[in-house]
Image: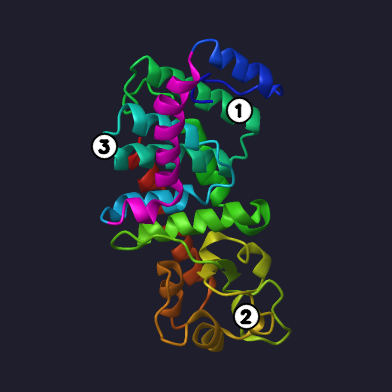
Amino acid sequence: MIIQKRKGSANYKDEYEDIFSRITGKQFINDVLIPYSEIYLELIDYRSYYGDQPKIIKILSLLNRIDNNDWIPVAMYYIQEYNEKLGEFLGLLEQFASIAMVLRKNFNWRMSKYSQILRQMEKGVDVFSRDSLLRVSDDDKRAVLEKLNGDVYTELKDTVRRYVLLRIDSLLTKGQPFYDHSVITVEHVLPQTPKEGSEWLQNFHDPSDYVHKLGNLVLLTRSKNSQARNYDFNKKKTSYFQPKNGVTTFALTTQVIQEDKWTPEVLEKRQWYVNTKLDNFLRYLA
């Protein structure tokens, strides 16, 4: 991908014969294989390489949760050829990759776009300029915000909704968190199936209007507990959402724990707040 700047064909033998018609084996090892292998490790084992740069660790921890690795050749090429304003570049790349994931852009679309971005960089086009294809279109930004205002729990696949919530959490958190927990689950505050006569049904006349919205979702660092899902709010937040040491990992979850009750008004206010954060974030990287 980096050398040819296009999606590879099914016949790798022909691809490599074409590459080695233009470069010797020694050149390939010294100028391509070794340096790009080291860069690849930097992107994957980012905590070891960027231990003193928390902003980059945060962005790479998010990028490594994208449900495809098509962004990696672009990052590798940029680091090899430019390596300036790395945090800003990775921020643009993360926005591009994550919006493509949320909008379910297919493999061919991604390969076409990333190939064009690589060719632009090879020509010296500034990736931070208005002409850069790494810039997300306003239409795609609006489409993402519209999708995230819907029933995200049912409309997005698990890896995508988890990524969205982690991204929102990073916008709510002071400092530079990174997300490498082995288990991260998405949980409902208002349960999906509240019991008859419960506090939930007293507060929410039609739970289906709220239950799968962003404002009703939190993150946990442990597996789901089916018994605890239907607890009333105060019991649920103290026994399920709050860890034994009293400190939750996620800002999203902390905000819920600080609430005294969970009503449509509280949930709608939280939904508005999250959407405002997302909108501001997309405008900041415009």
Gap between marks 3 and 2, in whole Å?
A: 49 Å
Q: Position of residue 234 (x, y in %)?
A: 52, 87
Residue span colored magenta = 23-51
Q: Position of residue 228 (x, y in %)?
A: 63, 84
Nearest to N terminus: mark 1 or mark 3: 3
User: At numbered mark 2, what does the secondary structure look like: helix, strand or loop?
Assistant: helix
Label 2, residues with CA under 10 Å away: few <14, some 14-19, many ≥20:
many
Q: Residue at x 43, y 34 (%)?
A: 34
Q: Position of residue 249 (x, y in %)?
A: 42, 72
Q: Nearer the viewer, residue 80 or 230?
A: 80
Gap between marks 1 and 2, in whole Å?
A: 43 Å
Residue 151 seen in this snapshot? no
Disc 3 residue type (three-letter): Lys
Say the numbered circle drawn on residue 170: none
Q: Residue at x 51, y 54 (%)?
A: 164
Q: Main secondary structure of the magenta part?
A: helix
Q: Nearer the viewer, residue 266 or 182?
A: 182
User: At numbered mark 3, what does the secondary structure look like: helix, strand or loop?
Assistant: loop
Return the residue at label 3.
85
